[in-house]
Amino acid sequence: MATLKEILTRRPVSATIRLTVPAGGARPAPPVGPALGQYRLNLMAFCKDFNARTQKYKPDTPMAVMITAYKDNTFEFTVKSPSVTWYLKKAAGIESGSSRPGHVVASTLSLKHIYEIAKVKQSDPYCQYMSLESICKSIIGTANTMGIKVVKDLD
């Protein structure tokens, strides 16, 4: 339940914008420029702040960003780590998953790879209260749907 102070100081939201931007690569050009420009948000402020927050990632890593635009032309944003599918494809060294998951194996990964991906995903806001084991199980499920076989150890 929100406190009285939070209710009184709440700013009216004009939009919630979801974008996928390469780490450290936010520029006022499309897709960032048109998406933020239509709500009259400060493009350069967003680009500088986003690039500063994502500098620890390798360039061109796709980052999901959720921008909340307020009616007074201010904004807040949260950056999520790259998707599980992106991590799985990078770890397996493949461009895309299997065209027939369950029948054709695209690649094989060890449980150690899964564990490392789970440790990174644990820092995400929506995963912070999940156990490492449950995150691993979710990642294994995603790997199975992509046609990536998970084994105990790679031979």
Image: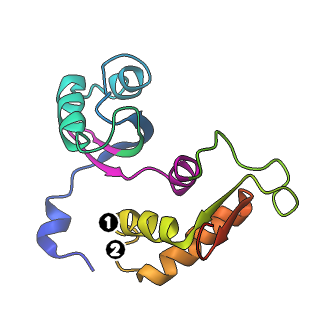
Is residue 79 visible in the rendered image? The answer is yes
SS for tag 2?
loop
Quadrant of the image occupied by residue 130:
bottom left
Give how far across and how far down residue 3 sits, in percent.
17, 76
Give how far across and how far down residue 119 sits, in percent.
37, 69
Residue 81 magenta: yes
**Residue projecting furthest to the top:** 29
Give how far across and how far down residue 53 sits, in percent.
21, 43
Quadrant of the image occupied by residue 4:
bottom left
Residue pictured at 16% horizontal, 67% vertical: 6
Q: Quadrant of the N terminus?
A: bottom left
The reply, left or right, for residue 50 in relation to residue 132 is: left
Vertical side of 107 occupied by 117: above or below: below
Three-letter amino acid code at disc 2? Answer: Gln
Task: Point out which mark residue 9 bears.
Answer: none
Residue that badge 2 annotates: 128
Residue 92 magenta: no
Residue that badge 1 annotates: 123
Residue pictured at 85% horizontal, 53% vertical: 100
**Residue projecting furthest to the front:** 155
Segment tinted magenta in the rendering: 67-91
The reply, left or right, for residue 67 in relation to residue 43 is: right
Three-letter amino acid code at disc 1? Answer: Ser
Residue pictured at 37% horizontal, 53% vertical: 80
The answer to whether the residues at label 1 and label 2 have Cβ atoms under 8 Å apart is: yes
Give how far across and how far down residue 47 sits, in percent.
24, 29
Vertical side of 36 occupied by 70: above or below: below
Separation of disc 1 and disc 2 at Cα? 6 Å
